[in-house]
Amino acid sequence: MKKPNNVSVIGGGSWATALVKILSNNCRVNWWLRNKSNVDFILKNKHNPSYLTDVTINTDKVNVTDNLIEALKKSDIIILAVPSAFLKDSLKEISKEKLAGKKYFLP
């Protein structure tokens, strides 16, 4: 099976952080977080300020962004790692057209 070139992880919690760390060993990851200050912190300090703070993120392989559409456009596979209570609000700007041809998963 061919490895995907780009994977998006949607969410900024501990589950998302762990997935980003593991996936970045084998492919390019687009990581969406809703909080711009967390994005800036990760880009500067190479770790999530709130979850799994001892896990180092390789920002050469991980595109950290607060722009959901940008993260989706660049990926073949989308992993939704957002708590179910916040899923609807997190995905409100995504239309079915933006997901056309993509594989997506709810872990």
Image (cartoon, helix red, strand yellow):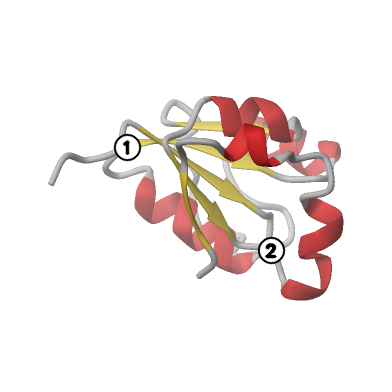
Q: Secondary structure at mark 2?
A: loop
**Is 52 drawn above or below residue 104 in the view shown?**
below
Q: Residues within 10 Å of mark 2 (few under 14, many from 20)?
A: many
- The quadrant holding residue 89 is bottom right
Q: Give how far across and how far down residue 93 sits, in percent.
A: 82, 40
Residue at x 64% of width, y 33% of height? 98
- The quadrant holding residue 99 is top right
Most foreground residue, 41 or 107: 107
Q: Secondary structure at mark 1?
A: loop
Residue matched to label 1: 27
Most foreground residue, 41 or 13: 13
- Asked whether, in this view, residue 65 is left or right of residue 23, the answer is right
Residue matched to label 2: 82
Residue at x 50% of width, y 70% of height? 107
Q: Give how far across and how far down residue 31 sits, in percent.
A: 59, 41
- Asked whether, in this view, residue 9 is left or right of residue 50, the answer is left
**Is 83 drawn above or below residue 79 in the view shown?**
below
Name the residue type under label 1: Cys
Most foreground residue, 60 or 107: 107
Farthest residue to the left: give it. Answer: 1
Residue 54 can be seen in this image? no
Q: Give how far across and how far down residue 11 sits, in percent.
A: 67, 55
Marks 2 & 1, CB-CB < 8 Å contact: no
- Asked whether, in this view, residue 54 is left or right of residue 23, the answer is right
